[in-house]
Image (spheres, coloured by chain):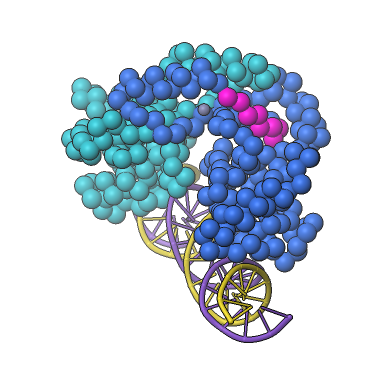
Chain colours: A blue, B cyan, C yellow, D purple
DNA sequence: TTGATATTGATTCTGATTCTCAAAATACAC
DNA sequence: GTGTATTTTGAGAATCAGAATCAATATCAA
């Protein structure tokens, strides 16, 4: 993803935040940032296997969780809960707000935005005397030709 | 809720399902059904405290979980995950599909339905070659006059 | 009423995430 | 560069909601 990006920009962003908060830039944090920025959505466990297999076998899972949460504080990541037993971290570095379309047959996750829907949400909230701070819209279903889902996905990455 | 309802109808519904599946109608199941039908949304833990305080002190929490899941199978209940650390069971006995507006300041949960939004969801899915099976729309915010939320809620029940 | 079968409650287990803590790494002043 | 205060790390323990176990008990059809 973002093949042109040399990572320097992002590491600088991370370092800026760390310095400001009296925190330290470690090799682990840099490795996790690098790996995270290569995907769109990933779980801590998946990222853990990825990094310990390919880069640093001694990496601790707790460090993955800690750093992922750090990236969420910075605004590079966001937690999602598409199913109720694992947190998926969404790489939102170059994304604005979006919602998700999730295939139940394959692993595909499509991001979309619908100003029309958002407008209606606001309208609905106002009708009930609410001021909205955030929302969650997740559409579950399957590709019309879902037999090809898995393969399509395999080549496209997650 | 549904003050006129004598419960007989609902117990009969439960019994019908149980009999059909070679299961048994127990006092616990009946007590849980009765308590559950009095609320709109409740957690297993809350229902547990409610029942063991007021009806049967010896009730086991596992039975609450088991029975709540049973009610979901029957279609009387539905799981919700408004926050990521507790399942809320929605009493949907007399409800059609609906989405939720949740106040962050008080405990208020408002149910709504928006055919316009649902239509746009279908449209969005179709645009991406998806057939929808279900979805989740949760709007978080706060009452415009949220200082009164808590009290308003206290009298209204959850 | 009986006896086969299902259910219960106490308890243990599970799995994801967080916490703890001693050892190691980092940053900053000199 | 060195020293040192401070933060971070990895291993493992702790947590917590919820599910699984299992012997004792309740239900129900015959
Ligand atoms: Mn996303
Ligand atoms: Mn509801
Ligand atoms: Zn949205
Ligand atoms: Zn809806």
Q: From the viewer's perspective, is residue D4 above or below residue A67?
A: below
Where does residue B22 sit, x and y in percent of width and height?
A: 47, 35
Where does residue D4 sit, x and y in percent of width and height?
A: 56, 83
Q: With A61 as the anchor, is B42 left or right in this view?
A: left
Where does residue B147 sit, x and y in percent of width and height?
A: 22, 38
Q: How many marks?
A: 0
Towards the viewer: A135 or A152: A135
Towards the viewer: B133 or B72: B133
Q: Which residues are magenta?
A: A106-113
Taking the spot 65% from the left edge, 29% from the top edge, the residue there is A110
Check residue A108 for magenta coloring: yes
Towards the viewer: A75 or B35: A75
Where does residue D15 sit, x and y in percent of width and height?
A: 44, 62
Taking the spot 32% from the left edge, 46% from the top edge, the residue there is B46
Q: Which quarter of the figure has residue A91? A: top right
Q: From the viewer's perspective, is residue A153 above or below residue B85?
A: above
Residue B34 visible in the picture: no
Check residue A111 for magenta coloring: yes
Taking the spot 78% from the left edge, 26% from the top edge, the residue there is A148
Taking the spot 52% from the left edge, 13% from the top edge, the residue there is B119
Q: With B50 as the anchor, is A155 left or right in this view?
A: right
The quarter in which the N terminus of chain B is drawn is: top left
Q: With B146 as the anchor, is A125 left or right in this view?
A: right
């Amino acid at each position: 993803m973002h093949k042109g990006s040399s990572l320097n920009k992002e590491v600088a962003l991370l370092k800026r935040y760390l310095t400001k908060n009296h925190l330290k830039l470690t090799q682990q944090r840099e490795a996790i940032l690098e790996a995270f920025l290569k995907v769109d959505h990933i779980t801590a466990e998946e990222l853990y296997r990825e990094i310990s297999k390919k880069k640093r076998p001694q990496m601790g899972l707790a460090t993955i969780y800690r750093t992922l949460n750090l990236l969420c504080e910075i605004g590079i990541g966001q937690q999602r809960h598409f199913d109720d037993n694992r947190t998926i971290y969404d790489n939102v570095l170059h994304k604005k707000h979006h919602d998700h379309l999730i295939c139940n047959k394959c692993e595909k996750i499509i991001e979309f935005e619908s100003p029309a829907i958002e407008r209606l949400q606001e309208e609905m909230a106002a009708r009930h005397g609410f001021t909205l701070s955030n929302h969650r819209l997740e559409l579950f279903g399957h590709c019309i030709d879902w037999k090809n889902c898995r393969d399509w996905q395999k080549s496209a990455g997650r």
